[in-house]
Amino acid sequence: MSSATAISAYSPGSWAPRASVGRAASVFEQAASPSRRISAAQRVVVQAPARDWREAVETKLQDLIRLPVGWDGYRGQPVSFETASFALRMLESILPSGGPGPQVIPGVAGDVQIEWHTEAGDIELHVRRPNSVHAWRETAATGVDGEEVELTFDFRPIVLWIKQLSEAIANADAAAA
């Protein structure tokens, strides 16, 4: 997969660009117009940041959306494309580029579980569908019952959880050295 990403306006349920309504056309919309050419100096190339975990997670999610119905020996559904896409975008926004890569596990209802299990603690994100995530973590500070939160749009608690988990791992590695 290329590290350069083209940007277009997205309309839910469609991959077609949206028409501009009542606003000036962006550089991207102008570039798409055959009547207007832009110079190389006006072009914008957007590159995704390098993330150590991204390729493995993306490959796993692609495998999970291709699962057959009944993959679990019963009536398990493949992970939905929308849920997989949301999970990947969510991870891109909450994980630092050098952050710990998660394990990705399918749920039987087209959902996906994203997990980190370390000696410093555990984090589990149950992505039921886009913008519906049940998050749980267990650390020495939370005890065995852990801490839970329901998330829709604001994932700052998970950013903090992952930062704390990463720091605990780094401190343990430094102490062992």
Image (cartoon, rainbow, N blue to C red):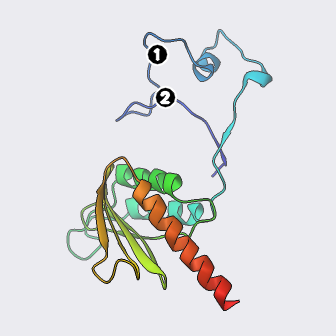
- In this view, the residue farthest toward the front is 141
Work out how far the residue at label 2 is from the one at label 1, CA to CA, in angstroms: 9 Å
Is tag 2's residue or tag 1's residue first in the polypeptide sequence? 2
Residue located beneath label 2 in the image? 9
Could you tell me if residue 60 is visible in this image?
A: no
Q: Quadrant of residue 66?
A: bottom left
Secondary element at image label 2: loop
- Left or right of 21? Residue 51 is right
User: In the image, is residue 161 above or below residue 1?
Assistant: below
Tag 2–tag 1 contact (CB < 8 Å)? yes
User: In the image, is residue 98 above or below residue 177?
Assistant: above
Of 109 and 130, the residue lying toward us? 130
Amino acid marked by disc 1? Ser
Q: Residue at x 50, y 73 (%)?
A: 165
Q: Residues within 10 Å of mark 1 (few under 14, many from 20)?
A: few
Residue located beneath label 1 in the image? 20
The numbered dot on residue 137 is none
Image spot of residue 91 (x, y percent): 48, 57
Amino acid marked by disc 2? Ala
Q: Residue at x 31, y 71 (%)?
A: 147
Image spot of residue 61 (x, y percent): 45, 61
Image spot of residue 92 (x, y percent): 52, 54
